[in-house]
Image (tube, rainbow, N blue to C red):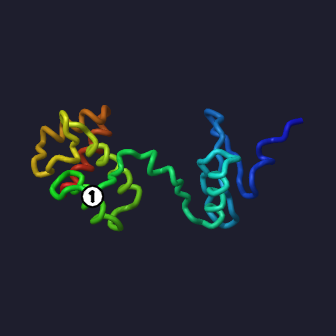
Amino acid sequence: MPKRLDDKLPRGVSLDRDFRTRKPRYYFRAPGKNKVRLREKPGTVEFDKEVACARLGVPYAPREQDEKRPGQLKRKPLEGTVDWLLAEYKRRVRGNISAKVLARRSRILEEICSYKFGNARCGDLPYADMRKRHVLEIRDAIRTKPGARNDVKRALSAMFS
């Protein structure tokens, strides 16, 4: 009889299957603490590092994260551009709004900065020249559903205010 996958998992790690798709989900559980979702594949070095971080109560951040997110700013943006305004917005609101809201708005705003206006990136253009028609064009291009379009408008409004 083959061994069950649960027998090979480190102590404190459990397998919970999704009730609809039956895909495996791994969690680390320690007494008196919240359970932590493990995203790496079991049996790999990264999984062991993630379990070790969960035991210590430290958030796990894989090193390849920078390579997976090509939209991140690698250089210092020029003053007066949309990229610069985004960096200033993130710097000023950090600690004033919840981390989840900031992360959601940042994703939307980074997507806006990478949007192409003809040959130019929106993030490289001056924010003072942005008009209502530009906002509507960006909103319609990157989102299709009405609620998502409103999220784009709200994120831009928050950044400009």
- Residue 136's spot in the image, x, y percent? 18, 37
Left or right position of 43 against 20: right
Identify the residue at image location x=12%, y=38%: 133
Left or right position of 120 against 72: left
Three-letter code, disc 1 = Lys
Identify the residue at image location x=62%, y=56%: 50
Using the rendered view, name the quadrant where residue 145 is placed. top left
Looking at the rendered structure, the number of numbered marks drawn on it comes to 1
Q: On the rendered image, what quadrant is the C terminus found in?
A: bottom left
Residue count near mark 1 (Cα–Cα under 10 Å), binned few <14, some 14–19, many ≥20? few
Front residue (pair 15, 46): 46
- Residue 49's spot in the image, x, y percent? 63, 57
The secondary structure type at the circle numbered 1 is loop
Identify the residue at image location x=66%, y=48%: 26
Q: Which residue lies furthest to the right in this view?
A: 1
Front residue (pair 62, 157): 62
Using the rendered view, name the quadrant where residue 139 is placed. top left
- Residue 124's spot in the image, x, y percent? 20, 47
- Residue 18's spot in the image, x, y percent? 63, 39
The residue under label 1 is: 76
Identify the residue at image location x=38%, y=45%: 70
Q: On the rendered image, what quadrant is the N terminus found in?
A: top right
Q: Residue furthest front?
A: 75
Left or right position of 59 against 82: right
The relative height of residue 79 versus residue 5 in the rendered view (above or below) is below
